[in-house]
Image (tube, helix red, strand yellow):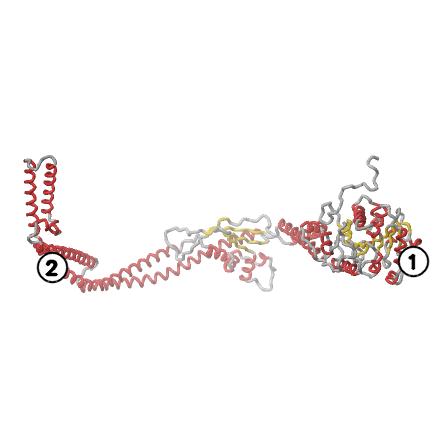
Amino acid sequence: MSGFPSSTNLPAREPDPDDGIVIDLAGYYHLLREKAWIIICCVLVGVTLGGAYIMRTPKIYAATAEVEVNQEQNKVVNIQNVTSEDLSSLELLKTIEQNLSSRALMERVVDKLQLNGGHFDLPPNPPEPYTRTYLAEQLQKNIKVNLIRGTRLIDVTVENRLPGVAQAIAGAIVTEYIASNHEYQIGIATEANQFLSAQAATLQQQLGQSKQALQDYKERHQAVSLDGAENITAAKLKDLNEKLTEAKGQRLKLESDEAQVEKLTGHPPEDFLAISSVADAQSVIEAGKQVMVVRGEVGDLSKRYLPKHPKYIQAMSALKEVQEVLDRTIMEAAGAVGTQYRAALETENKLELALHEQEQSAMELTKLAIPYDMLQRQVDSNQALFDSVLARLKETDVTKNLEDNSIRILEPPAMPEKPAKPRRGLVMVSSLFAGLVVGVLICFGCKLVDSSFKTIDQAESALELSAVAAVPKGKEGNSYDGGFVVVNEPHGAIAESFRTLRTSLSLLGRESERRVFLFTSAVPGEGKSFCSTNYSISLAHLGQRTLLIDADLRVPTIGKTFFKNAFHAGVSDVLTGNVPLSEGCQPSGIDLLDIMTAGHRPPNPAELLSGSGFADLVRDALAKYDRVVIDSAPVNAVSDTLLLLRYAQTVCLVIHAGKTARRAVARAVLRLTQSGSRPVGFIMNRMPEHSGADYYYHYSAGEYGKGVYGAPPADA
């Protein structure tokens, strides 16, 4: 506590009351616990309103029919309908969902079930009869169609006060939708059948005309059929063209070979092998093979015999003979090249003539085929279209009597046994929850509009002062038992807090400099008199002679606390000189503690306190007492306290936790500081007392040392 600010050396700055505000979950927890009665009242009101709602709300029964939309339309015959729909698309499923609650369908249901106003809680005898459309609109308000997400299932739910009516309407909605859908399909098929019948008659007439035109053309050109003639002619032209091309190639090759033969005239026979026509001749190839065989035999004999050996000589003779045969064969083949060239030239000429004749024939055939093909295509087109329309006409005759089963009733509506509304459990839980939420919001609202200090940390941070003591809230506020808590409950937390205050103030400096203590507050009702009284008692218990002065001349309370209704002369009487100091001090009934009441109420308290008499009073009191405690008026209410600051060595500011506005406290600190006596600290009075580690009062001693004061010795 030695680090507390001094009373004279701190700057006179107005503290910001919003400084140091910390949002803490523990604070909200204790706020809710403190305001639990508000939450309980809100919950009770919510539950009561929920029960009243359940009692007053009529019972509503709900019947549900579940239908399934088939992904593909089932076919009795393999024939396509006039209209085709993709039943697996989400758009179509949503369309069916909307159609099940359409007004047109509701009108069909009203007609089928003969519904009237009594089925919808309408007046039974209206001035004008209810129209079919109005009843359908009322029915729409009582149904709910829901496509189950991710499936092809649709729920149709009907609500009504009569369970039987709800069941009947739910079933009628589904059956009427299926019936209306079937009627629609029949209407479409009938219209299509009529249209196709008219088209078939027209196409049949056109088909007859096109066939007659084709027959007239055949007779006029004496052509039974031209089908395939073009293909045959084209094949012949292709074949002749290929043969002519091959003949030209052969002729050009032989022409080149003949020119080479003429150039090599007089050359050795082996030079003619460079000509392909000569080298490729079969006779030349056979003679060449024979030469190669004999040469191989000669080579084998040369490895075993000498050149003069009879076998070797015989083999060489045979080689010479076959070589001569090869030379003659080569020359004969060279002489035949000219003959081959002339034959190839004659073949080429014949093929060119045949190709020209075939081209002339193809041109004549094309002239006849073009009109023929146009007439034939027209016949084929009319025939195909007529066959398609005729087939579709027969299909519509069959399908218009087939019932569309793309939607089937998966689960028919059952008779509801219990009402669907009101849902008692949900209503009660919702009411309870709503009451709880409203109660919590009210608590938080109270916290938001409350600008008081709730914790010591908030006050220290905002005021830039330290807490010298935290006094918990007692059972009867902080004024029960005459305010003598230190005497009546010496073992309690409140008494311990004043002993802590006594110790804290004693450590502020030398004893000679801390003998006069002044207690004040920002506004009335903070508990400054309670604190000054119990602090004085704690000083007396320490063995120090103490004088408690009630300097609040406007609303004195010290005399009432100690002497009930008995009057004693006091401060005003001493200051006016009517009584001496000794007669103004009265014994309190507590050892070493005397009391000086306010005395007679003066007409001018401020003027009385501003004189030099109070200084003499304090000086004379210090000569007789060890400690002087002054209980003064609130700082913001009157200026009396500011007049007494010059006589006090230690100024303590009392704050009512959770009540005094922050700005009021900040203003009081500023006024005290500007007057030259900044408080050494503040006393947080009436703190909510919970556990020792509590957010609000974490300076409590809890159960530690309980029963020590005023208890008999342990060994007694």
On screen, residue 606 versus residue 243, left or right, reads right
| Residue that badge 1 annotates | 573
Q: 466 or 47, which is in the foreground?
A: 466
Badge 1 density bin: few <14, some 14–19, many ≥20, Cα 10 Å? many
Q: Label 2, secondary structure: give it.
A: helix
Mark 1: amino acid = Asp
| Residue 349: numbered disc | 2
Q: How many marks?
A: 2
Badge 2 density bin: few <14, some 14–19, many ≥20, Cα 10 Å? few
On screen, residue 143 versus residue 506, left or right, reads left
Q: 693 or 443, which is in the foreground?
A: 693
Between discs 1 and 2, the one toward the N terminus: 2
Marks 1/2: CA–CA distance: 165 Å
Q: 435 or 339, which is in the foreground?
A: 339
- Which of the 4 image quadrants contains residue 603? bottom right
The answer to whether residue 43 is above or below residue 230 is: above
Residue 171 location (% of width, % of height): 51, 52
Mark 2: amino acid = Asn
Quarter of the C terminus within the rendering: top right
Residue 219 location (% of width, % of height): 18, 63
The answer to whether residue 137 is above or below residue 150 is: below
Label 1 vs label 2, nearer the camera: 1
Q: Label 1, secondary structure: give it.
A: helix
Q: Is residue 475 visible?
A: no
Residue 598 location (% of width, % of height): 88, 56
